[in-house]
Every structure is written in C-alpha cells, then in structure tokens.
Amino acid sequence: MDSDDSVFFHKRFDKEMMPGRKLPYCQKHPTRLSYGLIALSYVLILALFIIIVSSFSSESPKVDSKVWTEINSFQSNISELSSKVIQMEKASYKETCEKGWLLFKNYCYYITSTQTDWMKARSFCIKKGSDLVVITSQEEQLYLMSIANMINRYWIGLNDEEEEGTWTWVDGTDYKTSFKFWKKGEPNDYMTKEDCAHLWIDGEWNDVHCTFDRCYAICERKLS
C-alpha cells in the first residue's frame, strides 16, 4: 500500500462509524413504526364505528348485520397487525449485540481487557461464540481503529503458521483477494517465526511471534 493510501486511512474518520452514535427510533425501525401507526389508526376507526353503532342500535334494535361484519373485520386486522408488531419487537432483540459488545453493520465486536498470546486470545473469542476479527473492508478497518485504543496492540484472525508466507484468515476468507492494511515493509517474518498478525499501535497490521503475550484481541461474530 503506498503512502497516499496510508495517509488517507489515518485522516479519514467517518462519523457514521463511531461507536455509540444512536439513530432516532423512526430511522432505525421504520417498518415497525409504520405498522404501529396503522394499528393505531385501525383502533381509532374501530372505536368510532362502535360509537356510531351503539348510537344507532339504541334507536333501532335491528342493526344491519353488514355493519357488524365490518367491525369484526376491523378487529381481525387489528389482531393481525398487533401480532406483526410483537414479532418485530422480538426480532429487534436479535438486531443488537449483548452488553459489552459493539455493533457495526451486521457484526458484533468485543475488545478483550487482558493481554495474551494469539492462541489463548482465539480460544477466548471462541468460548464467547465468536472468533478473532476478520477484516474484509476499508470501512471495517477504520471502525476498528476508532473503537480500539491505538496505543495498544490487538490480535486479529490472520496467520501463516501452516506455511510461511501463505496467510490465512480464521474463517477461510481468501487472503489473496481480500482487503489488506499491512504496515510498510510488513509482513517480514523478522527473526523468523512471526506467524500471527495484530493491529500495530497506529492501526496498521504487523506480524509477530504467535507466543507474544502483550497483545489484547478483538473478537467478532455475526448477528444471528
């Protein structure tokens, strides 16, 4: 990656990728809000219908059966809409990450609070139902740089332990065609056996010994 690209990555800071930024409810759940408004409209119309029918029935004991059919139809529609709203409310719980995790796009991220080596870091992530982060885009890279404290180092799910020079992502993502953000001159396998990748202090990638135990880690899992 040339210097211009590197400068671009470090200077760009998209506000939409900042953690903690909250959208108004109507922007986050437009469909649910629409169903809710429709259901409310039906309730109001039904209430008006009942008032009219009650007034009419007090004057004439024989209320047109067609009117009652319409009322029953309204009640059925309200019940159906209410069910859809409830289903969407339940589904919304799956749209958010658990406490301690950060949401970006369709993924949840967790930053460990303890430094450890690469294998222990990966085991920790797996126990939490995730894996070490696989970085597949410029947006994701920038997001991770925004949520991580870049005075520290963070393990990512990339290594070449099986064959030197053949880097692989833990989820099988094709390394050759995927996004890369190596520090200039890296990976260099300095002093040999630098087989695991981490985010360097400036956010760029660097290779280091997998037994190096001074790195935190970033776990990632897709929303179910």
Image: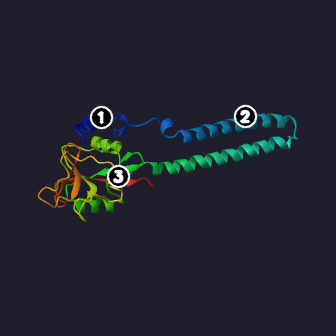
For marks 1 and 3 on the same chain, the one whose residue lies earlier in the sequence: 1
Three-letter amino acid code at disc 2?
Leu
Badge 1 is on which residue?
12
The answer to whether 118 appears left or right of 39 in the picture is left
- Which residue, given by chain and number where applicable, does mark 2 sit on? 48
Seen from the viewer's position, the closer of residues 24 and 182 is: 182
How far is disc 3 from disc 2 in space, using C-alphas? 63 Å
Please tell me how crowded label 2 is: few (under 14), some (14-19), or many (20+) other residues with Cα within 10 Å: few
Q: Is residue 39 left or right of residue 103?
A: right
Dividing the picture into quarters, in which one does residue 51 lie?
top right
Classify the position of the N terminus by image quarter. top left
Which of the two residues, 178 or 149, is positioned nearer the viewer here? 178
Please tell me which residue is depicted at 56% across the width and 50% down the height of the picture.
Answer: 87
**Foreground disc of the pair 3, 2:** 3
According to the picture, the residue beneath numbered tag 3 turns out to be 177
> Can the viewer see residue 99?
no
Task: Please give left or right for residue 40 compared with residue 140 in the image.
Answer: right
Residue type of the residue flagged with mark 1: Arg
